[in-house]
Image (cartoon, rainbow, N blue to C red):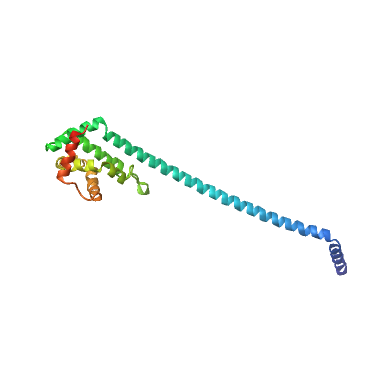
Amino acid sequence: MRRAILTSRRAMNREWLADPPTRGRYVLRSCNKYNGAMCSLDSNTVAAYAACVVAVMALIAAAVAIWQAHFTTRVQALLQLDSSWMSDAMRDARRKAASSLLKGETSVDVERVLDFFETIAGLFLKPHGILFFRSRVLYDHWTRHTFYWYAVCYWRKSLDHINAVRQRPRERGAWENLCDLMPRWEAAEGGAPTAGDIDEFLIGECASR
């Protein structure tokens, strides 16, 4: 039995050695299978990397679009506030308010002007939202550069009236956001204006058309 097995093995070896083309085809077939697997692996890897790159680019594009939308919204909000401040109705209220303040009086028009700046301070500049999603409608420095001089002069000249109103039990929060904002703006601008500067500004407001 053992001799028969050895004889069979020798015969197979002789057949393998006697047929080099067959042996070459076997080796070539094995190499092709290996190379095909490697090529398939490389293609899958490239496809995965490409998918990651596409996903990252999509996220970047979405972030840019969101930023542009927020930027456009802020610009439009600031332009609308400026348009409202310069409207004929508000100019008329400003003239009457300035005239009253120069006389040491108060009026509905004074409160209308203060309410305008309270809206800016409380609605557009005060952060809204929760935790990490708190944001302002307007950039503080944009709004300060646009409205600081108007706001500080009317606010400073109206402080006596503001304090008197806030002494009332039901109106302790009157113009609260404006009163919180103005000292910060004054510090950013290098200090409060003088009484002479404020009066000069109000005289100009009375003469504006």
On screen, residue 112 versus residue 78, left or right, reads left
Q: Quadrant of the C terminus?
A: top left
For the residue pair 176 and 75, the one nearer the viewer reads as 75
| Residue 42 at least partly seen | yes
Residue 46 lies, in percent from the top left, at: 60, 52
Please report the residue visible at 54 percent of the width from the left and 47 percent of the height from the top: 54
For the residue pair 145 and 180, the one nearer the viewer reads as 145
Please report the residue visible at 19 percent of the width from the left and 42 percent of the height from the top: 153
Residue 145 lies, in percent from the top left, at: 28, 44
Q: Quadrant of the N terminus?
A: bottom right
On screen, residue 96 versus residue 70, left or right, reads left
Residue 131 lies, in percent from the top left, at: 35, 49
On screen, residue 57 versus residue 201, left or right, reads right
| Residue 109 at least partly seen | no
Please report the residue visible at 35 percent of the width from the left and 40 percent of the height from the top: 75
For the residue pair 26 and 68, the one nearer the viewer reads as 68
Residue 18 lies, in percent from the top left, at: 86, 63
Image quarter of residue 72: top left
Image quarter of residue 169: top left
Outermost residue to the bottom: 3
Please report the residue visible at 68 percent of the width from the left and 55 percent of the height from the top: 37
Indicate whether 63 appears above or below 8: above
Mark count: 0
